[in-house]
Amino acid sequence: MLTGQTSHQAIGAALLVSRDNIASAQIGDLFREHALSVEVSFDISTALDRLSRRKFEAVVIDSSAESQVPVLQRIRASASNRTAVTFALTNDRESTARALTDGFGFVLERPLTPDAISHTLRVAYGMIVRERRRYFRCPVSVPVLFSRKAAAESFGRTVNVSESGMALRTATRLEPGWEGSTRFTLPDLLHEMMADCRVCWSRENGEAGLSFLFLPSNLASELQAWLTEKLEKQLPESVAEKFYAKTRDSR
């Protein structure tokens, strides 16, 4: 069985694999307070199917669940979820030590308390936000140029931008497989973005998707910082205060 709850302000998604209704409710409530939507799976096979179909920024697996380690291995082998932040829900110090040895990033040890869950989540939150940023597509409309050798330049406007590429709309259709370069300037940034890219999809209406093949490291850093700022602005004020307090404390 799979249940899901979402938040209009969610900045990421978490999958919780456990048959413990009380623990699931405790963890789910605190995760939602931190702007994470939560899906609860009582069934391993359903959880694995869900992991194969969508992206999760965080995954919590009950150590009492069958096949805990194989599930973690499947996560790490997944193209979309291999870098998800992982939590083990454990029963005692022994199972906690085993979970960390197995490769879980964080542990939630029973008996659970709101303070303990919140503390662990605050420690992990920066990683969750960074994980979300990797797939975050920021809606933005700015002029963009696509060019390739021995061909006319194509002008258009961006639809959204991510770390790894963009969607755009041009007057002339771009063909999938074309390789070239793109240039655009994002709001509030001084430097023009210039990247080698490939057209990965296109539509008859002029919309297309570009995948960045090469972006200079200084520009990549600027783009990451810009996306992080835009993503953090989506955080509810109460969550942002906790996140920034943790960031300041870690400096």
Image (tube, rainbow, N blue to C red):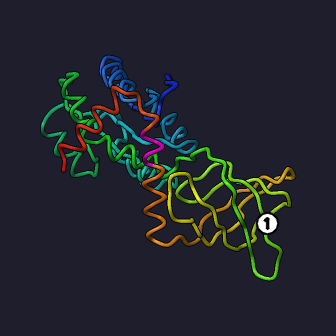
Q: What residue do we see at 53% from left, 38% from top?
A: 50
Picture coordinates of residue 231 (x, y %)? Answer: 46, 42
Q: What residue do we see at 19% from left, 39% from top?
A: 95
Q: What residue do we see at 23% from left, 33% from top?
A: 108
**229 in the magenta segment:** yes
> Is 180 situated above or below 247?
below
Q: Is residue 1 visible?
A: no
Picture coordinates of residue 93 (x, y %)? Answer: 12, 37
Foreground of the two, 237 or 2: 237
Picture coordinates of residue 28 (x, y %)? Answer: 37, 24
Foreground of the two, 81 or 235: 235
Crowd rating for badge 1 (residues with CA inside 10 Å; few <14, some 14–19, many 20+) = some
Q: Secondary structure at mark 1?
A: strand
Picture coordinates of residue 159 (x, y %)? Answer: 68, 48
Left or right: residue 205 compared with residue 58:
right
> Is 110 situated above or below 207?
above
Which residue extends farthest bottom? 150
Q: Please tell me in which quadrant of the rendered image residue 186 appears.
A: bottom right
Foreground of the two, 76 or 179: 179
Residue position for label 1? 154
Q: Is residue 224 visible?
A: yes
Left or right: residue 70 compared with residue 89:
right
Amino acid found under the numbered disc labelled 1: Ser
| Prevailing secondary structure of the magenta residues | helix
Magenta-tinted stretch: 228-232
Foreground of the two, 199 or 105: 199
